[in-house]
């Protein structure tokens, strides 16, 4: 009888004790950092790529939502959040993402007016699935530069400054070196020795 009672008490402890522990963990994760409200999508979003970047935006959504380097990004109340899904799984991001510094604040006006920096902008709407499949290859292969400069035909390509590693040394510097001097100096000294020997022979003949 005692064994049965001890067994019942042990089972009660095992079943009851983990519940408050898990509850404390779940509550503690989001303390002090509220998550943004959910965005209601009538249909899966279509994206456009902003010229001179590889940042994609959803122009039909009332709030700013971006796709960049495999992540969905959105600002809310002075904070930034990101997720691998456009409609769920948002988590707080502690900094302003680096890509955002190059995004014009009035990009929506440029989109509606089909203009970018004073030039005609024939933007292309892209299903989000296609962007998520191809964003990396497009970026590596400079897909949008080659495709009529992001749809802005008169847009001049950006000039990139050469890095130090890309600057090749001049040919004179490549040829100069201790080995080349060593191969030249012995030939000159042998010639001088031959001239001295010839002069000695002529003196002896006289």
Image: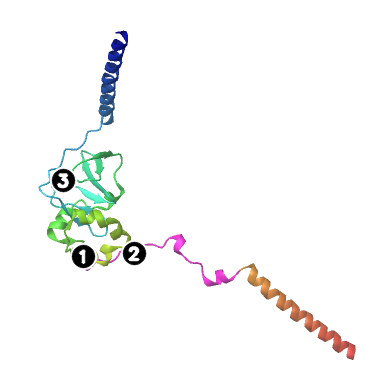
Please name the residue that numbered disc 3 is placed on.
63
Q: CA distance from mark 3 to mark 1?
A: 25 Å
Mark number displayed over residue 152: 1
Part of the protein shown in magenta: 150-176
Q: Left or right of 184: which side holds 88? A: left
Most distant residue in the top direction:
1
Most distant residue in the front direction:
1
Q: In which quarter of the view is residue 24 placed?
A: top left
Q: In which quarter of the view is residue 122 placed?
A: bottom left
Q: Is residue 74 above or below residue 145?
A: above
Residue drawn at the location 43% of the way across and 60% of the way down? 163
Residue drawn at the location 70% of the way across and 74% of the way down? 185
Please name the residue that numbered disc 2 is placed on.
159
Q: Is residue 187 above or below residue 119?
A: below
Based on the picture, tell me whether residue 153 belongs to the magenta stretch: yes
Most distant residue in the left direction:
42
Say which of marks 3 and 2 sits in front.
3
| Quadrant location of the C terminus in the rendered image | bottom right
Instruction: Classify mark 1: helix, strand or loop.
Output: loop
Dominant SS in magenta: loop
């Amino acid at each position: 009888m005692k064994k049965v009672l001890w067994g019942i008490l042990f089972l009660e402890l095992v079943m009851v004790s983990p519940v408050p522990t898990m509850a404390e963990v779940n509550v503690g994760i989001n303390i002090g950092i509220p998550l943004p409200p959910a965005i209601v999508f009538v249909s899966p979003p279509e994206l456009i790529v902003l010229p001179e970047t590889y940042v994609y935006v959803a122009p039909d959504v009332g709030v700013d939502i971006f796709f960049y380097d495999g992540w969905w990004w959105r600002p809310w109340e002075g904070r930034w959040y990101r997720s691998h899904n456009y409609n769920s799984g948002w988590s707080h991001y502690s900094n302003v993402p680096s890509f955002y510094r190059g995004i014009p604040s009035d990009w929506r006006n440029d989109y509606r007016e089909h203009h970018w920096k004073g030039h005609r902008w024939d933007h292309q709407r892209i299903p989000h699935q296609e962007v998520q499949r191809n964003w990396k290859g497009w970026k590596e292969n400079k897909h949008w530069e080659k495709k009529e400069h992001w749809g802005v035909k008169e847009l001049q390509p950006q000039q990139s400054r050469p890095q130090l590693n890309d600057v090749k040394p001049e040919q004179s510097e490549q040829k100069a070196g201790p080995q080349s001097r060593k191969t030249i100096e012995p030939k000159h000294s042998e010639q001088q020795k031959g001239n001295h020997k010839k002069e000695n022979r002529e003196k002896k003949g006289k």
